[in-house]
Image (cartoon, helix red, strand yellow):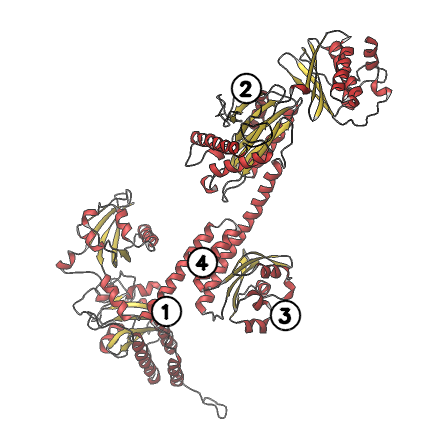
Amino acid sequence: MGERRAPGLRIRGADHVSEKRGRLLALAGDDLRGIELLRFAIQQAVAELAGLGGMVHLGSPGFGGGLRLAVTSGLPPAFTQAWERVDGNGPLAPARAFREGAFVQASLASIGHGMPEHGAMANGPPDGAEAGSWPVGTAIAAVPLLGRGGPVGALSVVTVSSRKPSAGQRAFLDTLGRWAGERLGRSTAPPPDPALTEWEEQPTGPQDLQAVGTWDWDIRTGDIVWNDAMPTVLGLDPDTVDGRIDTWMGTIHPDDLPWVLSDMDEAIYTGRMHSTEYRVCRQDGTIGWVRVRGQLVLDDNGEPARMVGTLWDVSRTHDVLETIIAPQTRNAESASAERASHIRRLAGALAEAVTVRDVVAASADHILPSFGASGLMLSFLEGDHLRPVGFTGYPKEFIDRIARMPASWGLPMTGVLRERTPMFISSSEEYIERYPATADIPAAGGKQAWAILPLVASGRPVGSCVVSFTDRHQFTGVERNLLTTLSGLIAQAMERARLYDREHTRARELQRELLPRELPTLPAVTPAARYLPASKDMEVGGDWYDIISLSADRVAIVIGDVMGHGVAEAVTMARLRTAVRTLADLELSPDELLSHLNDLVSELGDDFYATCLYLVYDATNRSCALARAGHPPPAVVHPDRTVHFPDADPNSPLGAATPPFDTVEMELPEGSLLVLYTDGLVESSTMDIDQGMAELARALRGTISGAVAGHRDHAAQPDATGLHCAECLESLCDHLTATLLPSRQRTTDDAALLVVRTHALPSEDMACWPLPDHPRAAGEAREHVRAQLRAWDLDDLSMTTELLASELVGNVVRHAKGPIHLRLLRSNVLTCEVSDGSPTTPRIRRAADTDEGGRGLQLVAAISRRWGTRFTANGKCIWTEQPLMPESTTLLPEQVGLDLYDLLDDE
């Protein structure tokens, strides 16, 4: 049946398409050169013949007739590897087209296909290639690239059919070959010397073998043995070569060194021949190229043992290629290589980025120079708003404005997230046409072109990345693909960094909540402290400190360090700090308190350890008692500016110690300094703890000397340390941390510093009396209290204090034993103490309605602000505290009970 056609309709054949494609060549600009030119030519040829793919070989008639593969498109590496080098005098289609200067077509099935080593095609098809490895009819068509001086290469297309091209197709291919050849050779240098033979895969003559280096690399030991020619090939002075492999590797250009090792590893892993070219930096400063070939050698057990091979200079080959490819191509390749280098470094930086700030910095450092951009903004989508988390190249006011704009306004940043498709806007006019509602955005941001990329991680949108340009910018296909690919890397890094920041912030907040918000203001001490977390890539630690007010102007000072980093360590630190406060309220001695802490840490498990220093300072006699569990000793600074560290056994850390703990007791002169710290302040990878403590002592002496010099004219009583105020102690903390830790990168551990200046309670604020072990002792106690409070002008507290003293003394007379002492202390509170020789601890009990006694301690608890008991060397001490300003207290007869009236009767 004949074909039916509509009236006036003509079917245009392949020749018509060839004519239109030929006219397309005339439209290509002069900026299409080098690799881009060859790739464009391949694409046109493949489209013309409806082929599978194509390749271009370059060569020179006067250069031995050899051809080298320069560019491929659409063909797998397994195929093109066999065509890397082609013998110009051989029967293959590219060689014939190059040699004859005319179109050639040949069947692929007749020559087979395999995966030979480089250069195997120089002498024909590879050994072992089966003739039927390609389907019958599969062919390769080749056309010469004709320059002004003759053929400069050949363009080949692999076709699915051996059918001859039409006349129009032949004419187009001839035109394409002349067009590409002329453009390729416009900027070439004069033809190379015909005597050169470096186009051959490797030297074959005896004189050439003298310039071939041979090497034998022992994979297990890393030793390499080479012949005398190796230094010559590498451009090294033979007298400076010691035969070590790092000398050879050192000659490889630093940019290529990772690929050297990667190629070797692949050859060792797969057992295939290693064959690669590397750029080398010679000792005379010149750059050259060498070809390395190696083969894996197995031992008797079939395990990789050695790599053996050859190495020779192929620098002249590259020089010839440089004369064939135009300088413009080299500039484009250099720019492409620079961009690729930036992208490789960006990928590495994103892999190492920990925080969102790291991701922003890495993206700005590598994306902006790679694409010539001037602005970058990374944002997270939170609810109905985009929250910018990092930016560069924009004013802060513009970023604040973007943050206030809801996503419902139709910003392009939210649009790409909704559609998960990148958007490229080349001009401000294009932006205004697309988004008229926000037409003032380009002027406000000062940009003219934008690449707006969605950040999608784990299948869900997390934010957007905007790369912007000051001037108009036409995005090429390569740029679009690269930016789209980079957005995926940035999205993964941003999501990982956001999770880290969130958890790190929570852990930091937990740690800050567990440390004292403010150190207490006490008459006995003036404190200042610093906590410095470890470097950014570390988790929170377990360093902690505290100051606890005890009875009778005594102060507990504690510092500790839970070993390790993380939330678990921070929680352990909180448990220890709570335990210390609870045990301190029991007025335990330092060694006894550490024993209880050791039991607590031991119960947490075998993986938990902590160091701790617990110190008790008594302002009434300036005594200091301390015990350590694996913690560094405090630095004690006396008023004469001497610095020393108490010499005592540090004991083992909590969790590994065996009580009892050693206790150090000393007397501190008025105005002494106690400097407590964790090991992160004085120990690092570059400084052991002894050096750190010596450095701490030097820093203290230097700071105190400077403080003294700065306060010579101070009107108050001279202070030998020069640190007479809380602000001075704060400055001291800053100086010590800046001196010992000038850069936080020096240490991977947290550091805590606690500086305490001690004060003695003046003798005129203390009064003490012995009392007889007799019922009339209560009356004497009231007389002493009444007289002393009159002398201190505290008559308003006389009645309450007399009742307290009477009850405490009455308890001793009835239930304990002497000797009995009464002591009053005037500080920020009024303390009344009664001590006796009995270790029995009194306790409050609930008295029945018919009981005639047992309400004494209820009375004490009712009329004092706080009270308690502590053990002494000879017994115990019961104490009470009252504010110096009297508080309103009304006592009912049933609250007083019979105890007080019995004491009054005793009087």
**Residue 666 badge:** 2
Residue to which mark 4 is pinned: 366
Point out the tag, 2 or 3, that comes first from the N-terminus. 3
The foreground one among 186 and 680 is 680
Amino acid type, mark 2: Met
Q: CA distance from mark 3 to mark 4?
A: 33 Å
Please state, as top left, top right, bottom left or bottom right, where the C terminus lies in the image: top right
Q: Nearer the viewer, mark 2 or mark 1?
A: 2
Which SS class for mark 3?
Answer: helix
Nearer to the camera, 112 or 33: 33
Q: Nearer the viewer, mark 3 or mark 1?
A: 3
Q: Secondary structure beneath disc 4?
A: helix
The residue sitting at the bottom extreme is: 7
Mark 2–mark 3 distance (CA, rounded to whole Å): 77 Å
Residue at the image point whose x is 86% and y is 19% from the top:
893
- The disc at residue 437 is 3
Which label's residue is closer to the chain start, 3 or 1? 1
Disc 1 versus disc 4: distance between alpha carbons? 29 Å
Q: Nearer the viewer, mark 2 or mark 3?
A: 2
| 897 relative to 262, above or below | above
Amino acid type for the residue under numbered disc 1:
Ser
Residue 712, position in %: x, y? Answer: 54, 31
Task: List the residue tagged with mark 1.
Answer: 73
- Of the numbered discs 3 and 4, the one sitting upstream in the chain is 4
Sequence order check, earlier mark of 4 and 2 = 4
Query: Please, is residue 536 above or below residue 399 in the view?
Result: above
| Left or right of residue 690, residue 203 in this image | left
Crowd around label 3: few <14 · some 14–19 · many ≥20 (10 Å): few
Query: Which quarter of the rendered picture does the N terminus lie within?
Result: bottom left
Q: Quadrant of residue 101?
A: bottom left
